[in-house]
Image (spheres, rainbow, N blue to C red):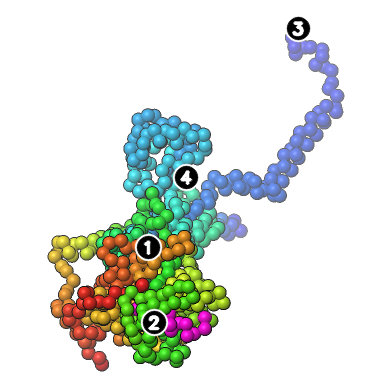
Amino acid sequence: MARLNALLLIIAVSCALGAVAAHHQARKLVSEIEREQVRMRALEVEWGQLQLEQSTWAGHARIEKIARERLHMKPPSPGQVISVEAARH
Amino acid sequence: MKFAKSPLLDQPLPNWRARVVLYALLAGFVLLGGRSLYLQGFDNNFLQEKGASRYSRVLEVSATRGRILDRFGDPLAVSTPVKSVWAIPEDARLQPAQARELAALLEMDVRELNRKLAAEREFVYIKRQIPPDVADKITALKLPGVHLQNEYRRYYPASDVTAHMLGFTGIDDVGQEGIELAFESTLAGKPGSRRVIKDRRGQIVEDVESIKLPQDGKDVVLALDSKIQYLAYTHLRQAISEHKAKAGGIVVLDARTGEILALTNLPTYNPNNRVRLAGSQLRNRAMTDTFEPGSTMKPFTVAMALEKGKFRYDTPITISPGHLTIGTATISDAHPHSVLTVAQVIQKSSNIGAAKMALSFPPEEMWSMFDSLGFGTPLKLGFPGEAGGRLRPAKSWRPIEQATMAYGHGISVTLMQLARAYLVFARDGDLVSLQLNRMDTPPLSGKQVFSAQTAREVRAMLEMAVQPGGTAPRAQISGYRVAGKTGTALKVEGGAYAEKYVASFVGFAPASEPRLIVAVMIDEPSAGGYYGGDVAGPVFAQVMASSLRALGVAPDAPLRPLQVADAIAVKESM
């Protein structure tokens, strides 16, 4: 009887310790996912800012200015345009 | 005598005293036990709340406002987080050096800062919406009573080019104008909140419950083509400065779908920096301002005349002696002609011809034609302040009014309505509704206003108007067949016509298979002419040519230099 009790006690204590460990593990994982979520939001913000930056650099006004002034480009005159008919299948 | 030997101690205490004390103590324990039972078992909310407040927190979860994208997915409006600096004046006892440092970081006057901190309030904004890097420096200063708060700020990368289309949001990121207001319910995000357990270091260790899920705003994809928008904007700006005009607007529509590809107005403003804004800059003229369109209305009169079968394209109309008297008023043409065919009435833009055709129909028929084209009723696109224009009921029309309406006076429209009505000529007679959003499938046919036959005949006449001998040879484009109509109208000011003009041009191309409709309106041009063909026509040609090239539309005419015979071009009669 005493042996059985001792065995049960050991089982109970180890279960309790297991529960504590699992709980601790869960909390660690939660804080990890929170950190990652914060990082995700920060990256989203950065993405938005990069999009803004990209559209500022790729603005039509800027492209036109560079094309005209630095690359000396101009719209083709009527005689310079050749239109090619795509082959129809 | 010693105390221990005092005779008083020998006296026995009465028994009841001990019992009273015992019962009093027992009663005290019962009371305590009952109270603790009550607190633990029955009324335990209060204590649990107190306990929970030690470790549980309710966090606000912010939601972002949706982006506005053009038809290719390029962002036109994006919200990005910024910080606002606020203070509790009572706590913010800053040293003069600290105040100077803060003011320098915020680029504001020290005196203004001190005045704000001296306010007798519990909460005062010092500066709203500062960039994140400045915010970090302020946090590093660790000033007492000065706090930062997260906010969102809307940025418009295309700035003044798309200002009127997009509108803007207020300081609290709520739409105030344009698309931002029209699509507010879609764009706006709903912040949520959740309960968490935090440990001693402030880290979240358990997610207890989500009280309200945050909902990020949805993106809105417009039909707008930012390239065409930019082209329209630059060409309009150039024309306005060249002709020293007061204002102007351009609308570009996709003739196949009714999508609004571009909408621009001048004067405009920078939506990213809205200090010192005037009402005239804010006005979305193409949507909210009505004007008497003038001759751009003639094609509708002619289409009605053809549709009812009373006229054919070659029916001759007597124009001589060059004026037409109705009641006490006289209509005249700027250039005398003796006889014009119906087609030539459009080509030469004859007021008398249009008026004579209109007068052969009852007013009700003309009214219902205008009404079915959408004149007189707002477009209901959801834009704030959309105007419907003025179309009076047919019963109140006098003959002279019916005659002037045939060439676009006595009726007022918005530029957007006018551009939309031209869809009937570009689309074989059916009128589809306009679309602000990108359409992935072309619409089924709309409301049939004119027959396809009539629409094609008017289209051919509109092509003649642009060729040499017409009113707008300068609206030609090399490589494409163009159809369109000029308008030059006197402005109504205080109930009478003033010596001020509105020059307009509405047209579409390629005429063989219309793809784009471009409507141009220039208000009060004061240099370099005022005729629609001279002022608005070239803008139309530039915008149309560059847009067709940008879209890669195949040319339908030989690529040869244009025959612009300016000297012999017939100037449009009013």
Real-space CA distance between mark 2 and mark 1, rounded to the nearest whole angstrom: 24 Å
Secondary structure mostly seen in the magenta stretch:
helix
Real-space CA distance between mark 3 and mark 1, rounded to the nearest whole angstrom: 131 Å
Mark 2 on the same chain as mark 1: yes
Real-space CA distance between mark 3 and mark 2, rounded to the nearest whole angstrom: 145 Å
Q: Amino acid at mark 3?
A: Met
Q: What span is colored magenta in the figure?
A: B349-363
Q: Quadrant of residue A85?
A: bottom left
In the rendered image, which residue does mark 4 sit on?
A: B200
**Horizontal and vertical percent for residue B414?**
43, 69
Mark 4 vs mark 3: in front:
4
Query: Residue at (36%, 65%) from the top-left corner?
Result: B501
Q: Earlier in the sequence, mark 4 or mark 3?
A: 3
In the rendered image, which residue does mark 3 sit on?
A: B1
In the rendered image, which residue does mark 2 sit on?
A: B353
Mark 3 vs mark 2: in front:
2
Q: Earlier in the sequence, mark 3 or mark 1?
A: 3
Is B339 covered by the magenta stretch?
no
Mark 1 on the same chain as mark 4: yes
Element type at mark 2: helix
